[in-house]
Image (cartoon, rainbow, N blue to C red):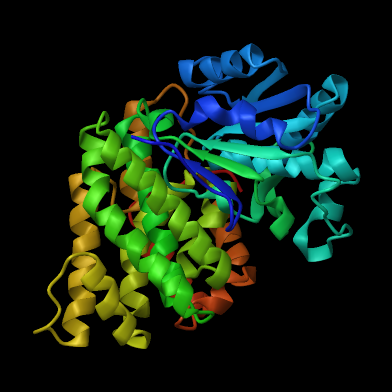
Amino acid sequence: MSVNVYDRFPNCLVVGEGAVKTIGDHIRKFGEIKRVAVITDQGLKSLPIVTDLIDILRAQGFEVSLFGDVRSLPTDRNVLELVEKMKDFGAEAVVAIGGGSAMDCARAANALYSYGGTLEEHNISRQKYSYSRNVLKPCFAVPTTAGTGCEVAAGCGIIKTDPITGEGVDFYIVSAKQMIPDVSIIDPLMSISLNPATTAATGMDALTHAYESMVSLNDFPLAAGLSLEAIYLVLQNLRAAVTGGGDIRARENMAIAATTATVSFQLCKLGLVHAISEGLSAFALIPHGVANAILLPQVMEFNAPCVPDKMVRVAAAMGINTFELSEQQAAARAVEEVKSLMRDIEMPFTFTEYLNQREKEQPEIFRPISRKAVDMSLKLAMESSFIQTNPRTAAVEDIEAMLDKQFAGYRFSADN
């Protein structure tokens, strides 16, 4: 496979098997850079995909400092610790390798490192700074999952924690088009060792991005084409990526699907799935892709009456023959196709199922969630901008009903 460079929109994309080996050439295009900070998460820092990247950079003459303590859901503490390490090292460029957590933490830290200030001052609700690429350090993204699309995203989400307990209490969003990484390396070899469960969850995240941008009230014809192509790629490739992890073609197509879907939602925004899932990830620590997957069929059914024509197009992109189906039948078939995909890749269908499974598999580290975490998620959902672009108005009672169904039979912890 060849390595192709697309340097026009939305940033510079370097795509193909072995693309990561060219990263030094792209860093040098940004001037006399010597010191490169490599940011990744705790689970990846010792794996060959990270150590090999560091070896590539050092062989090409760069000094490298590794920050490998990003949590699976990055927190304000992660960001502030990273900023201090970048200061100590004198970082001149940032390379984020991993999933959305590493890329979000790296980009938020780059903003604070380059401009100073606090996360509160960079938070989108009261953003104090006007970002410039001349001030932000050059940022390079190497995704190792195919779902979040943070390699082409303008926003990053960081959990605000209680200074005493360390538990999540709110959510920071740092966002501007200048926050999109300058160069993204889309190399399918970076995801070849990804386990089936994470491959499945991140793939469902990509599908959710594509669906929600397609049906958004902020729709745009150009973005619709991107969304439908991403839906097609996920339905055609996710099963193979999960069950045959070494399928390079499926891995590359899933990586392209993730990037394509994210470009679409940068234009159109998202909807009710993400409005609810953000809080569940922040407060109940449910992985983002898992939360999206569980919510997606229910939200598709909820939205369907308001977007019948779009659901026909979604169904067609999934490979369903819609010519002899009514709009309602096509929408129902699309939902069933998502459920079939979830069964094939062994995704849970409710949060109760997911949490009980986690407790059974990891009893020594599992902590049951509290009802308070769900209530906080509901509050955050009602405040989310994504609820405003969802095609069907969702009242608090609607979201409560969804959450009650998804947590039916679950034994919450006694924590308030």
Q: Position of residue 142 (x, y in %)?
A: 54, 35
Q: Is residue 140 above or below residue 68?
A: below
Q: Mark yes or no: residue 36 visible.
A: yes
Q: Is residue 405 left or right of residue 126?
A: left
Q: Position of residue 312 (x, y in %)?
A: 25, 79
Q: Residue at x 65, y 50 (%)?
A: 157
Q: Nearer the viewer, residue 365 or 145?
A: 145
Q: Quadrant of residue 128?
A: bottom right
Q: Position of residue 10 (x, y in %)?
A: 59, 57
Q: Mark yes or no: residue 75 visible.
A: no
Which quarter of the rendering shows the N terminus? top left
Q: Is residue 254 above or below residue 1?
A: below
Q: Is residue 205 left or right of residue 101?
A: left
Q: Residue at x 24, y 33 (%)?
A: 247
Q: Nearer the viewer, residue 162 or 328?
A: 328
Q: In the current view of this chain or complex, which residue is farthest to the left?
A: 324
Q: Residue at x 44, y 21 (%)?
A: 364
Q: Residue at x 58, y 50 (%)?
A: 7
Q: Is residue 295 left or right of residue 7?
A: left
Q: Is residue 145 above or below residue 271?
A: above
Q: Is residue 112 above or below residue 224?
A: above
Q: Position of residue 31 (x, y in %)?
A: 79, 34
Q: How many numbered dots are placed on residues in this image? A: 0
